[in-house]
Image (cartoon, helix red, strand yellow):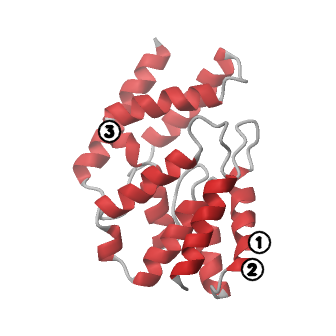
Amino acid sequence: MNLIEIIEAYAHCKENYNKENSYHNWNHIEELLKEMSSRGIIDDTSQKESILLTYSILFHDIIYDPKKNNNEELSAMHFKSYSKERLSLGEKDVNVVYEAILDTKWPHAGRSYIGKLLVDLDLCALCDEKRYKENGIKIEKEFEHLSEEEYIEGRTKWLTMMINKKFIYHTTFFTDGEDGRAFEILQNDLKEIRK
């Protein structure tokens, strides 16, 4: 694992993210990378874990079509293909990243430590009401191909699934207070939708 490979992967992903998506785009990736740094994840994990998490963040939404339901699988396959051609990662590390990307699919449950970190970061805006609302507008725009009824049905299903989880966050980089705040924000959103 070397810095040049990370820089090249960063450039590859930045170039290949869907620029038409209002939420699942490069800005989302930059937000997660900043969150990874600001929460001290880089300082509190091994170099290898930080690198694997970085690759997981970079590639987790590289293929995202709001009309499809296999985006995570396609993104994971894209990473696996890219890694064979361009990265000096061993098969075990490639599989850790591959599985972490798959972990971002509903119901958002990381199987490995890297998967849990990625899922927590991917859901980090749920505990911040302002960011949650801003992202909600972007996500709704991304799904404007759905009728209002279809969007509300899907959103209600997602909110109910999230609210019924025991925890939103699964790593120590998120506090119990943030978990509680996320549940509160999600419950309030569900009440608004049901009005």
The amino acid beneath tag 3 is: Asp
Q: How many marks?
A: 3
Measuring from the top left, give residue 17's x and y in whole percent: 66, 50
Is there CB contact under 8 Å for labels 1 and 2?
yes
Measuring from the top left, give residue 23's x and y in whole percent: 56, 38
Q: What residue lies at 77% left-to-right and 72% top-to-bottom? A: 81
Tell me the element at label 1. Answer: helix
Which numbered mark, 2 or 3, is in the foreground of this view? 2
Check residue 81 in the rendering and tell me which mark sits there, or answer none. 1
Mark 1 closeness class: few <14, some 14–19, many ≥20 residues within 10 Å: few
- The answer to whether 187 appears left or right of 18 in the picture is left
Q: What residue lies at 61% left-to-right and 52% top-to-bottom? A: 105
Q: What residue lies at 46% left-to-right and 64% top-to-bottom? A: 116
Check residue 128 in the rendering and tell me which mark sits there, or answer none. 3
The amino acid beneath tag 2 is: Lys
Check the picture and name the quadrant holding the N terminus. bottom right
Q: Quadrant of residue 142?
A: top right
Q: Quick check: can you spot residue 23?
A: yes
Check residue 84 in the rendering and tell me which mark sits there, or answer none. 2
Mark 2 closeness class: few <14, some 14–19, many ≥20 residues within 10 Å: few
Give the alpha-carbon distance from disc 2 to disc 3, as whole Å.
38 Å
Is there CB contact under 8 Å for labels 2 and 3?
no
Give the alpha-carbon distance from disc 1 to disc 2, as whole Å.
5 Å
* Sequence-first disc among 3 and 1: 1
Is there CB contact under 8 Å for labels 3 and 1?
no
Q: Is residue 106 above or below residue 51?
A: above
